[in-house]
Image: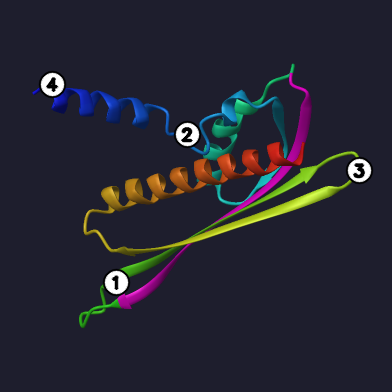
């Protein structure tokens, strides 16, 4: 019995010090600030972007980036059944970040495609689309922060 508990304790000690850390865990601690200069495109996505960027509007940061953002969202029909009712959609989300600095401007383009079955309840489908947009935007903002922090 003592051997088993000793082995479990040793395993726990090794697993705690394995060095695992989430990629985006320290994005909020970065010393950068994002200022939204202009945003255009899909209204719902623009609202989510402006809300998400408020986390990174720190006036006392070392590095300030000005952003022009363009969003786009399309819902294309993939297939229909024999009655002509839509059964599957292709949801395409795009976002472009133009980072303006004194020296130059850098452009980061992100695009994601999601195949989705049609849901008979339109309210649930709209909520599903909103969740897809929100997840896409938050992921791409975190990726942008990671890229900008690597430039410093």
**Mark number displayed over residue 44:** none
Q: Report the front residue among 107 and 40.
A: 107
CA distance separating discs 3 and 2: 34 Å
Residue 67 in the magenta stretch? The answer is yes
Position above or below: 141 against 35: below
Closer to the eye: label 1 or 3: 3
* Mark 1 or mark 4, earlier in chain: 4
Residue at the front extreme, as displayed: 3
Q: Which residue is mark 1?
A: 86
Residues at marks 4 and 3, CA–CA distance in whole angstroms:
65 Å
Q: How is the image coloured?
A: rainbow
- Name the one closer to the observer, 11 or 20: 11
Bounds of the magenta segment? 61-79
Task: Give residue 132's position: percent from left, percent from top.
Answer: 41, 49
Q: In the displayed structure, does residue 93 sit left or right of residue 16?
A: right
Count of all numbered marks drawn on residues in the image: 4
Q: Of helix, strand and loop, which one carries label 2?
A: loop
Of pointers 4 and 2, the one earlier in the residue sequence? 4
**Residue highlighted by disc 2:** 21
């Amino acid at each position: 019995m003592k051997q088993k508990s000793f082995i479990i304790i040793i395993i726990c000690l090794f697993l705690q010090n394995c060095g695992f850390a989430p990629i985006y865990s320290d994005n909020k601690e970065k010393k950068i600030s994002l200022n939204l200069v202009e945003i255009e495109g899909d209204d719902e996505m623009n609202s989510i972007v402006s809300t998400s960027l408020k986390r990174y509007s720190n006036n006392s940061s070392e590095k300030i980036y000005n952003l022009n953002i363009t969003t786009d969202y399309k819902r294309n029909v993939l297939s229909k059944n024999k009655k002509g009712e839509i059964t599957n959609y292709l949801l395409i989300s795009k976002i472009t970040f133009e980072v303006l600095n004194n020296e130059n401007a850098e452009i980061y383009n992100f695009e994601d495609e999601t195949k989705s079955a049609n849901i008979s309840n339109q309210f649930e489908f709209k909520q599903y689309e909103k969740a897809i947009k929100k997840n896409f935007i938050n992921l791409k903002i975190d990726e942008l922060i990671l890229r900008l922090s690597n430039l410093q």
